[in-house]
Amino acid sequence: MKGLEPLPAVDRGSVVPGSDMQWQRIVWPVVVFVAGIVLWDLVVRIGEIPPYLLPGPVLVFQTLIADWSVLSESLGVTLLTALEGFIAAAVGGIALALLFNQSKWLEYSLLPYAIVLQVTPVIAIAPLMLIYLPQQTAVVVCAWIVAFFPVLANTTLGLNSVDRNLAGLFQLYRASRWQALRYLKLPAALPFILGGLRIAGGLSLIGAVAAEIAAGAAGAGSGLAYRISESSYRLNIPRMFAALLLLSVAGIVIYMLLALVSHGLLRRWHESALRKEK
Amino acid sequence: MVEPALSSSDTPTAVRLRGVTKVYDNGTVALGPLDLDIRKGEFVSLLGSSGCGKSTALRLIAGLIAPSAGTLDVAAQSSGHAIGFVFQEPTLMPWSTIRENVRLPLKLAHMPDAQSSARVNEVLAQVGLTEFAGAYPRELSGGMKMRASLARALVTEPDILLMDEPFAALDEITRFRLNNDLLALWRELGKTVIFVTHSVFESVYLSQRVVVMTSRPGRVSAECRIVSAEPRDDAFRTSMAYAGYCRDVSQALIAASDEMANAAKARA
């Protein structure tokens, strides 16, 4: 067949990094961070505030280094709990959303209970979980409860947001349910799923900390939340701040890792991950 | 090269609608009763105002929705993937390359990639997109996306090509170019084409027959046969004959609109 004349080569638009914006996105938070630290230090020094009320940033940093062996071990425990809760939330949330998508009656039957889990404060559920389950399992379950709903809600929304015409096209070509799921619904829902996972990453850490506080257990397997409670009881405020700092950094790292995964999976096609073109 | 079949009584019927109506769940009567015969190899445009049920008719023929009443025979449907559909928007999967978008219907038919690649390459060459096979839809212009959509519709070698205002969102120059490309493909492949449009000029330029539909609920109000020397080109677009056909079709469209307005007044 002869066919049509091939189209002339066109410039597809060279993708260049929005260098100014990229630069500002890093510099401004750093400026605010440094200004905050300086302000904090000045307040403590000028006000001569005692360390048991508000330690200065230098003291917090010194405590972090001095207590690193204890704090890092606790950080490992909390991160492991958060990771287990996150994986359970990711697998459970996506799997349940897929089931909801395939069966409306299942969605109608189970969704209200998923919402009940979401709206009940985990700090109220944790004591019950600690009665019925082994401590470590109860803590992971709490992390899962907090993190699971955003994954479920986002995945459900994504699976239901498939382009109507594309769905019609799959119908026209008599695609099976499995084909429609694999080639259409899951890729279309991917940005929503990744958005849910990003939220769940932070929430699983929050859930783990809340459950650890409720558990209040000491010993070799103690997480960072226990270290915070313990420091509070002993008025070791610098260590409390150091533990809080570690938690914040852990939360930021989790978010950034998930954002990186999201960017890697979406960078070729989804608006949220595309750099601005000049 | 397959010469396009002219509509005549001895050419087999590709699509037949008899008393077809469509009432949506909300009670809207979108179509009918519609009686229409389209012959194999014919290029027919369904012309009417927005909301007159043209797209509904196309979706009924594609089997995407079921008629509320009447009979609908599509000869091609018995032979599997015999219908190609081009939507108003390109409707490409943004997460897949152009090659994978075009391959989709063959993949859904469980054809292994090794086997489908030759056909995909062939149809990409037909629409002039070989060089862009590895690009993502976002990297292409509106016209090129429509070419990709057309390639996907042609990849299964369908007997019938259904096109739902495919060029409506494009600028005039791109639309003219794609009109010519579509006519070239139709002459080459000899498909039956049912083309929905609200443009009088486009319908006259492309079609062997223009079916003018009334406002909702859509029915056939008039049919105009367009006879011209083949192949049609820009000379036809600027000819007196073309202007005459456009005038006739425009008058038929106005009459169809008046007919419905008068009927509504009479009911009131």
Image: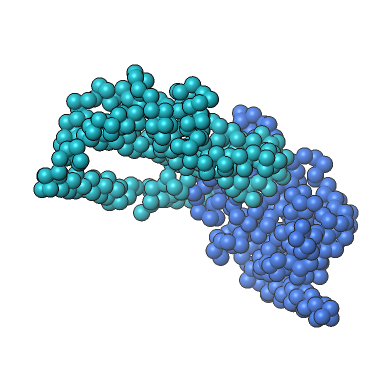
Chain A rendered in what hue? cyan
| Up/down of A20 relative to B173, above or below | above
Position of residue A76 measured from the top left corner of the image (x, y, whole percent): 34, 24
Would residue B83 be found to the left or right of residue B32 on screen? Answer: left
Q: In this rendering, is residue A14 above or below A129?
A: below
**Residue for point 70% across, 66% down:** B51
Left or right: B22 with respect to B155?
right
- Quadrant of the image occupied by residue A231: top left
Identify the residue at the far front of this view: A233
- Asked whether residue A63 is in view, the answer is yes
Q: Position of residue A78 (x, y in %)?
A: 37, 27
Give the camera-side residue of A111 and B14: A111
In the figure, what tint was chain B given? blue
Q: Residue furthest top?
A: A220
Q: Nearer the viewer, residue A224 or B100?
A: A224
Residue B127 visible in image: no
> What residue is drawn where x is 75% and y is 60%?
B26
- Residue B100 percent coordinates (x, y): 57, 38
- Can you tell which quarter of the image residue B158 is in? top right
Residue visible at 74% across and 63% down? B53
Please name whichever residue, B268 or B202, is drawn nearer the observer in this view of the structure.
Answer: B268
